[in-house]
Image (spheres, grey):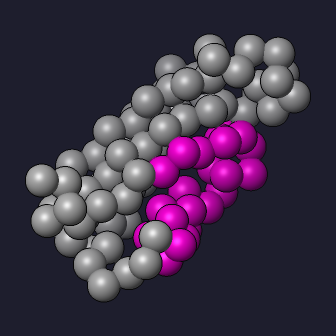
């Protein structure tokens, strides 16, 4: 998998698992050049996801849902992931 394919795969996985009304994936890998994870091929990404599925869940539970959707990617293609997980009401 090329680095350019990773953001789209992350987006597709989140869309399938959480049916968000909004999802943005940003590749921040260039900001971490030389970092050990970057040298080993893992990317650094930021995700902003808005989903009804997060309603009633605390931040930690929301992050767990995101990590579960990306499970196998967290063991290689993704070295670090910054998550902003909101309900539709919270994004306003």
Q: Residue at x 65, y 57 (%)?
A: 72
Instruction: Answer whether residue 19 is visible to the viewer in this image.
Output: no
Residue 74 location (% of width, % of height): 67, 52
Along the viewing direction, whichever of 77 and 81 lies nearer the viewer = 81
Residue 8 location (% of width, % of height): 40, 35
Work out which quarter of the rendered image holds the N terminus and state it: top right
The magenta stretch is 60-83
**On the rendered structure, is 49 left or right of 58?**
left
Q: Residue at x 30, y 61 (%)?
A: 86
**On the rendered structure, is 45 left or right of 88?**
right
Q: Residue at x 25, y 57 (%)?
A: 50
Vertical side of 17 occupied by 73: above or below? above
Residue 37 location (% of width, % of height): 81, 32
Vertical side of 63 occupied by 39: above or below? above
Q: Which is the main secondary structure of the residues drawn in magenta?
A: helix
In the image, residue 71 lies in the stretch drawn in magenta: yes
Residue 80 location (% of width, % of height): 66, 42
């Amino acid at each position: 998998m090329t680095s350019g394919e990773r953001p789209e795969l992350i987006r597709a996985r989140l869309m399938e698992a959480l049916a968000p009304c909004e999802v943005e994936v940003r590749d921040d890998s260039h900001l971490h050049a030389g970092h050990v994870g970057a040298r080993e091929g893992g990317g650094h990404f930021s995700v902003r996801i808005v989903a009804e599925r997060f309603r009633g869940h605390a931040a930690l539970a929301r992050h767990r849902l995101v990590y579960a959707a990306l499970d196998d990617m967290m063991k290689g293609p993704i070295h670090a992931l910054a998550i902003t997980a909101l309900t539709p009401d919270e994004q306003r």
